[in-house]
Image (cartoon, coloured by chain):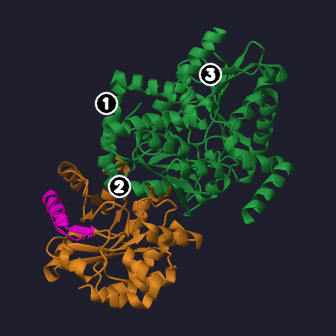
Amino acid sequence: MIDRGYYEGFGGAYLPEILVATFDDLEDKFIKAKNDPSFWQEYTDIMSTYSCRPTPVTFAENLTNHFNGARIYIKREDLNHTGAHKVNNVMGQGLLVKRMGKTRVIAETGAGQHGVATATMAAKFGFKCTIYMGEVDVQRQRPNVFWMDRLGAEVIPVREGTRILKDAINEAFRDWVGNMDMTHYVLGTACGPHPFPEMVSYFQSIIGKEARKQILDKEGRLPSRIYACVGGGSNALGIFKGFLNDPVELVGVEAGGRGLDSGRHAARLSSKDASIGVAQGYKTYFLQDSDGQMKETHSVAAGLDYVGVSPILAYLKESGRVRFESATDREVVDAMSLTIKKEGLIPALESAHAFVQAFKEAPKLSKEDIILINQSGRGDKDIFTVADAFDDPRWKEFIKKKAEEYNA
Amino acid sequence: MLESYLKSRLIEKKILLMTHIVLGYPSFEECFKIIETMVNAGVDLMELQIPFSEPIADGPVILHANQKSLAEGSTVEKCLDFAQNVTRSFDIPFLFMSYYNILFKYGIDRFAVAMAERNMKGAIVPDLPPEEGQDYLNAMKQYNLDPIFIFSPTTPDERMNYLASFGRGFIYCVARKGVTGLDTDFSGQLNKYLERCRMATHLPLALGFGVKDKNDIDFLKGKTDIAVIGTQTIRLVEKKGVGAVGEFIGSLR
């Protein structure tokens, strides 16, 4: 399947010549690490002592009773250190950076989770750290920006283009082409040029490996369906990889934004609006116009608000192995609200996309069916966005008072 | 074709000048005036960049030019129409420069036909290494167009030979790491790199990234065949207007 990082025509490495040697070196170091049995051990050791692995699988009894259909389980990636699955990839790449002898890391971030995870890893390993973040995302994910600052990372707001995730990726590449000698670019999702899609999904596959064992231990059988939200696709691939060879239906849920008919969404694989193209170093489905110019995307969840999608998921879509759906901003806030009330769990807005689709399908399944939702991250970071969505009067009052204090 | 043109020009001149503009920036009308001025001032060949929304190898100046051109409504079709007009009006070789998605979405073969019909001589596609470019290489060959490949200071000797085996017309040597428009240190380090480039190919060498004045070009004489001025003229047009271009180009040699 893999040839220069190709997945049946998706992927590849469309690189400016200046980066070719860097990618050759990265691929070489990654393959060596992958073939070194002590590397995965080192990786799982650090994930179990520094993060919270294995993360549990939680039986959502109240949601199960509420929908009166399939038994609902939730994989708790929100319990990772830094609050999302992003740390899985970041710590793995951090170990590679040590092997490569580099001293500085850079990263893009959308929701800020990947930025916080990278800044955390850099603090722990003693690397310098620069995070590129679209100006729009800096506004909507302020709490994460605050923590990146505290962790000692330099956060650079990106004012180019659409000022969101894809533009942050472009700026990170522009940094890297000048500084590749001592700098590693910790790409946060299973996109970009080879070997990133393979490498990121390799580290994230720890989610699916654990989940498969956990669900078998608990129920003695496999789930019927697994749901994961899809931005770039790293959490989805992470959990899906554990079940690719099983008779389990895999469902990826993209950002439907204001609705697929509105044009204001980030649905690449579940809408008719995307077409195959090459940008940011790889070939996949992009939301682009007929000239090949990338379009503006929209989602309430900054982490899903991206114009491309993992080439591995594009391949799994074409092969029919993964089904793709979308959830609108409104549905997402409702699903989040229900999950908070029924289970006391606070999924991130990104993760709540997966819950939406699971909730649509759970009542139609039998009580014998098991479904598993990947809660890729926790929603605390979304407090400003969610408070707005709920139009929470007491929150507004608090913010006004706080602002007055600062003005005084 | 392009190679023999360049080599014949090099009999008369010590170093040739290639300039770079972004089509539709500041406007197509002004682009035409800039080209006219450059040709009159003795520029030997030009690259015309078709704007793209994600130009990852370009620095802030050219990035903004891409974005503004697109915001003003530039399309690939308008760029092709403009190219037709330019090649009819001026008697120097013109190349397209753009990112691969522009060619890919237009259709590689169809794009090559469009180039040939407009008498464009070749293309520079900075995010398309030969490993990914088989369709492009075939189409360029079929329509007698020159694919320009790029060397960089991080390219090992062996890979330079490999790249040169696909290139025609000339080789574009990137002077340093980093994006377009940053400063370049014209010094002994660059000499060594250009010697490596020269060893790898019989094609003429162009050097670009950070070339901005007569001193830089004097340094390059005898070491490279073509000096590429990109960001500097775009900056100049932004600061002083199209009128300043002729004098600037004239001052370079």
What chain letter is assigned to the residue under label 3? A
Q: Residues within 10 Å of mark 3 (few under 14, many from 20)?
A: some
Disc marking residue A179 = 2
Position of A7 compared to A379: left or right? left
Discs 3 and 2 share one subunit: yes
Discs 3 and 1 share one subunit: yes
Examine the structure image and report whether residue A79 is included in the region drawn in magenta: no
Nearer the observer: mark 1 or 2; the answer is 2
**Residue A121 x/y as whole percent:** 47, 40
Please tell me the colour of chain B: orange
**Residue A35 x/y as whole percent:** 33, 25
Residue, disc 3 = A56
Dot 2: what SS?
A: helix
| Residue at image coords 27%, 79% | B44
Residue, disc 1 = A32
Q: CA distance from mark 3 to mark 1?
A: 30 Å
Q: Is residue A180 visible?
A: yes
